[in-house]
């Protein structure tokens, strides 16, 4: 696959982050399934026929194949499961949530937002990585700069 320039790379990472958050948002709406058609189920990425959701699947695969990302392994529906957003780690792969579990995630807290509730929120379950963290990790691996 041809290498993307950095601005294109940031654009598709932005789309990945936004679409992942949209899946989580839609899954938490009382009638979120009403927005889906043709038997699509947010918890089953194999049913996704929407072009944006299919692009999310392709980007997810690209992150794993080309940028050394690794899906975190589910530990079951434990309320005290680890937070996906694990902070900067040197030379370790970026852990990303499996597509079939995006519907169970919540958005990462914005930096400094509700900082007093951070421990309580962390204990409530898994969170999606924020776009800034994903972009920073991937840009470190961008081939022309490695």
Image (cartoon, grey):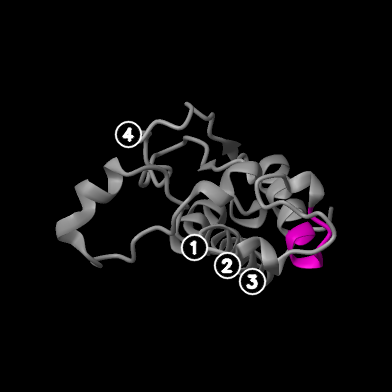
Which tag, 3 or 4, sits closer to the chain's start? 3
Q: Is residue 98 left or right of residue 2?
A: left
Q: Nearer the viewer, mark 3 or mark 4?
A: 4
Residue at left offset 48%, top offset 58%: 136
**Residue on which disc 2 sits:** 18
User: Percent position (x, y) of residue 1?
Assistant: 84, 53
Q: Which class describes the residues within 10 Å of circle 2: few (<14), some (14-19), or many (20+)?
A: some
N-terminal of the pair, mark 3 or mark 1, is: 3
Q: CA distance from mark 3 to mark 1?
A: 11 Å
Gap in angstroms between the C-alphas marked 4 and 2: 25 Å
Name the residue located 59 percent from the left edge and 36 percent from the top edge: 70
- Residue 39 appears left or right of 128: right
**Residue for badge 3:** 11
Can you identify the residue that label 1 sits on?
Answer: 131
Would you name the residue on which mark 4 appears? 80
Dominant SS in magenta: helix
Crowd class of label 3 (few under 14; some 14 to 19; many from 20; radius 10 Å)? few
Q: Which residues are magenta?
A: 48-55
Q: Nearer the viewer, mark 1 or mark 2?
A: 2
Asked if residue 99 is positioned above or below residue 11 in the image, the reply reads above
């Amino acid at each position: 696959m041809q290498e993307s320039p950095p601005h294109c790379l940031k654009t598709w990472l932005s789309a990945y982050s936004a679409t992942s958050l949209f899946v989580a948002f839609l899954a938490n709406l009382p009638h979120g399934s009403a927005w889906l058609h043709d038997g699509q189920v947010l918890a089953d990425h194999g049913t996704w026929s929407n072009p944006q959701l299919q692009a999310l699947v392709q980007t997810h695969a690209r992150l794993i194949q080309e940028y050394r990302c690794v899906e975190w392994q589910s530990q079951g529906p434990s309320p005290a499961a680890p937070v996906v957003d694990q902070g900067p780690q040197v030379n370790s792969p970026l852990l990303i949530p499996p597509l079939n579990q995006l519907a169970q995630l919540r958005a990462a807290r914005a930096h400094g937002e509700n900082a007093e509730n951070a421990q309580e929120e962390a204990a409530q379950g898994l969170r999606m990585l924020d776009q800034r963290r994903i972009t920073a990790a991937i840009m470190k691996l961008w081939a022309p700069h490695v």
